[in-house]
Amino acid sequence: MLMEFIYQNPALSPQERTNNLLSLMTLEEKVGQMMQISYNTLSAEEAEDWASNKKAGSFLHVLGKKAEHLQELALSTRLGIPIIFGIDAIHGHGLMNGSTIFPSQLGMSCSWNPELLEKAGRVTAREAAADGIHWTFSPVLCIGRDLRWGRINETFGEDSYLIGVLASAIIKGYQGKSLSDADSILACAKHYLGYGESTGGKDAYDTEVTCRKIREVFLPPFKKAIEAGCATFMTGYQSIDGTPMAINKKLLYDILKQELGFKGFVVTDYNNTGSLVTLQMVSPDLDDASKKTVEAGNDMIMATNDFYESAIRLVKSGLLSESLIDEAAGRILSIKFSSGLFDVKKKSGYASRSVISCKEHLQVNMELTRQSIVLLKNDKNILPLNKSTNIKKLAVIGPNADNLKAQLGDWTFFTHPDPNPEAVPAFEYYTMLRGISERSRLKGIETVYHKGCDILDDENQNIEDAVSAAAACDAIIAVIGDCVEQNGEFKDRANLDLSGAQQKLLKALKALGKPLIAVLVNGKPLCVPWLQKNADAVVESFNSGILGGKAVAELLYGDFVPSGKLTVSFPYHSGQIPVYYNQLSGWHSPKYMDLAERNALYPFGFGLSYTKYQYSNLVLSSAVCGKEDTVAVQVDITNTGEYAGTEIVQLYINDKVSSVMTPEKELKGFERVSLKAGETKTVTMSLQISALAIVTPDERYVVEPGEFEIMVGPDSKASSLLKKTLTVC
Ligand code: NOJ
């Protein structure tokens, strides 16, 4: 190939190529690189104009031939800078009908299995790359503590440490061995920072977090994302203490880019810059908003198209320094070079489409789905069903039994941002009904189905018929939960009780006096104390993806032994929120005076198995240590039940007395351990003493000498944990 420009030489480093390219670019071309254009909002001609004349650096939400066409236009411009195409491939490349759709982020987090999440990231990358995508806006590192928030389903749960571990794993999966490999895509750590914590669970609203809390709780997962090499970050929608994140220079520039040394680029969220004028009212006009957005440290501007003229005008009139435009465009170009966009990924079709939904991907999905399901109650070992006697006929009842959309959850081609609810799935899928009916048939058990009621509409119910269908059966599987209309952006909820006539349906089924097994298909925790009291078994599947029904059926029949554990606590009542496990001590009351229980209905880390585990012999390698040391925490786990299984062993700490208040418990490690029936294994987890640091009021990380309680057990409940004291000198 004839090389006209130095930057076209792949033998040079991304930085050398970026420097050369930047030196050749006009101001307009550099601002163009900062533009991310939302394809769905434009006519085809407008999109072409952005690709060929304004030379937009990126488009989002465009696939296939349309994307190929835009890329051809971009490559035929003066400098031929390729477009970077981004999409929300959140739990698989779900906006493309036909791809592998995994459980939601919340669902997959319940596996506590970083290796498997890395594989899921790989699968998503291979399928998205085959579809011409270079970049996924994933993972979400928000902390899911206010369960009213509509986007809990998108989080890895409520714990900052676990979120960091799982996020790092999936980032490695997306980005592969090298960013420039044909089947690697860029990851995006979002939403930086504190977005999940908006007051009242109101999406994108103001967040009342302090700088100290930011360093203690919200920043650590993002630090881990940088360590994992995450190429891009996305700015949150919300404000912190009155300052919109999009213009929070301290967090975006001073901390992220300077202090933490993040070398990739930052993209705003959708129209963050415009919202400064229209929603958040901190800028009188777009020029002011654009100037503040750039000066705060954002590099790419998502879906504020007028930023283009505004930024050019600001630089030409001397109100915005061109060096900031150079820095932003330079960061974007450098990632384009290092991810192979100018070389291997220049033309579409660089990755084979044969991988999409291939057998290997199906296997990863199947394993992750199995490990994502959490058994919450199993009275008198009613499960697995093949052990219980005399079930010849099984009733499958409820609005989520045959509801693929509710099962898949948000961010698929059915839902948003480009909803196609009538689409016919181009993949094999298992609703709960299909999975349970097929597996039952294999076991010689007949099934009958009735929907019973709707999830949203109180009027739309036929409980009588559902009950008479169930009356003719030996046991009932009730599949209830929530639906896509109750989860996602713009869908915060005030009331997390089972909606519609679901509770009425459950009570009517219970009155039959038959074994009642509840399967929850839901985006996030709901308030289900009635189920805990009245159902014989409760299975939590969250949004379990296209294979959810198969995995749940296998679990019900004991074809595998459940190992999933909750990464988010369940409340008894919506008014009890937040109910996350790692709260500060000091509440005067023992509980709310009008609620019987103080703690969560199901706590963080909780999940049952068909077998039983016993913890014993907690030993620390040293009871006294220094601030720089690492202590080995050792414990014996015995499988005392009848089945082989996998236990998720959890390590918590408590700083007994510290200069600032610290949580009652904080997760600092975990280990998955597989044990045959009767087997004992010794598990060793290493605890770096630096991880015990508190954040001081002046925002320093300091390990304070004194006593720490080291706790190990199966979940975060105090009564479940073995304890030892460690003294740090
Ligand atoms: C808005 C959402 O907040 C963000 O998570 C998503 O990546 C962008 N829109 C693009 O769809």
Image (cartoon, helix red, strand yellow):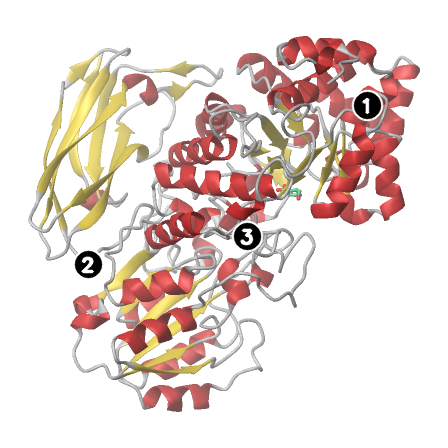
Q: Earlier in the sequence, mark 1 or mark 3?
A: 1
> Circle 2 sits in a helix, a strand or a loop, which is it?
loop
At label 1, which amino acid type do we have?
Val
In the rendered image, the quadrant that contains the N terminus is: top right
Question: Few, some or many C-alpha atoms within 10 Å of disc 1 (few <14, some 14-19, many ≥20)?
Answer: many
Circle 3: residue type: Ser
Q: Earlier in the sequence, mark 1 or mark 2?
A: 1
Q: Secondary structure at mark 3?
A: loop
- What residue lies at 55% left-to-right and 64% top-to-bottom? 405
Image location of residue 604, percent across then percent down: 34, 46
**Image position, residue 665 (x, y; %):** 30, 35
Question: Mark 1 — residue?
Answer: 31
Q: Secondary structure at mark 1?
A: helix
- Number of the front mark, 2 or 3: 3
Q: In the rendered view, would you say 326 is above or below 557?
A: above
Q: Position of residue 628 (x, y in %)?
A: 28, 10
Residue 406: x percent and y percent? Answer: 52, 64
User: What is the quadrant of residue 725 in the picture?
Assistant: top left
At label 2, the amino acid type is Tyr
Q: Which mark is residue 99?
A: 3
Residue 610's label in the rendered image is 2
